[in-house]
Amino acid sequence: MDPFSLLVINLNALGFFGFLLPWIFVFVVVYGLLTKAKFFENPKIIGVLSLVVAFFVIGFGGPWLANFFVNLFGYAAVIIAGILVIILFVTMSGGNISKLFDNKAVAILLAAVGLVIFFVAVGGSAVVVSDAVIGIVFVIILMAVAVYFITGSAK
């Protein structure tokens, strides 16, 4: 077995993905939100409150929360890689990326992709879609966007 697979297996056995990473994530998000909102003046109080909230959330969510984060960030990484490929296609075809995000359709598309990532990470209790179907739909969307940008927009 290669060393990286062994490392991931050992970290998983130690609870790194099931407890530590979700706990750190919740702690940092709560700490950042309380600091940004200036809820308390004393940063020590914000730190202790964030610590307590992080333990409560992990105690409540447990393995389900860890599985959600693993799925969410896994699918998000694939989508971000796809977006990077789209950006490469746009720049290779002479397009301007800064003007691309001025379009409201792009913002709506990105919001829709975010919702799809969220629902796939949750598990889609109402609709069961296999990973192969998700991959095929994603590739078709990537191809359509690439063709659209390579052929140019109709302005």
Image (cartoon, rainbow, N blue to C red):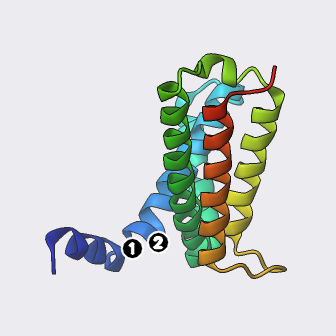
Q: Is residue 140 above or below residue 15?
A: above
Q: Is residue 48 at least partly visible in the picture?
A: no
Asked which secondary structure carries label 2, the reply is helix
Q: Nearer the viewer, residue 48 or 18?
A: 18
Quadrant in the rendering for residue 150: top right
Asked which secondary structure carries label 1, the reply is loop
Residue 35 at x, y = what percent?
62, 29
User: Which residue is pictured at 76% across the width and 42% down the height?
Assistant: 109
CA neighbours of label 2 inside 10 A, class few (<14), some (14 to 19), many (20+): many
User: Which residue is pictured at 78% across the width and 49% down the height?
Assistant: 112
Point out the residue furthest to the front here. 151
Q: Is residue 101 above or below residue 118?
A: above
Amino acid type at circle 1 is Gly
**Does the CB distance between marks 2 and 1 fall below 8 Å?**
yes
- Quadrant housing the N terminus: bottom left
**Residue 104 numbered mark, or none:** none
Amino acid type at circle 2 is Gly
**Residue 15 numbered mark, or none:** 1
Q: CA distance from mark 2 to mark 1?
A: 5 Å
User: Which residue is pictured at 75% across the width and 34% down the height?
Assistant: 106
Q: Is residue 80 above or below residue 4?
A: above
Report which residue position mark 2 lands on.
18
Quadrant in the rendering for residue 42: top right
Residue 111 left/right relative to 140? right
User: Which residue is pictured at 76% across the width and 75% down the height?
Assistant: 124
Q: Nearer the viewer, residue 51 or 136?
A: 136
Residue 20 at x, y = what percent?
42, 63
Q: Nearer the viewer, residue 68 or 139?
A: 139
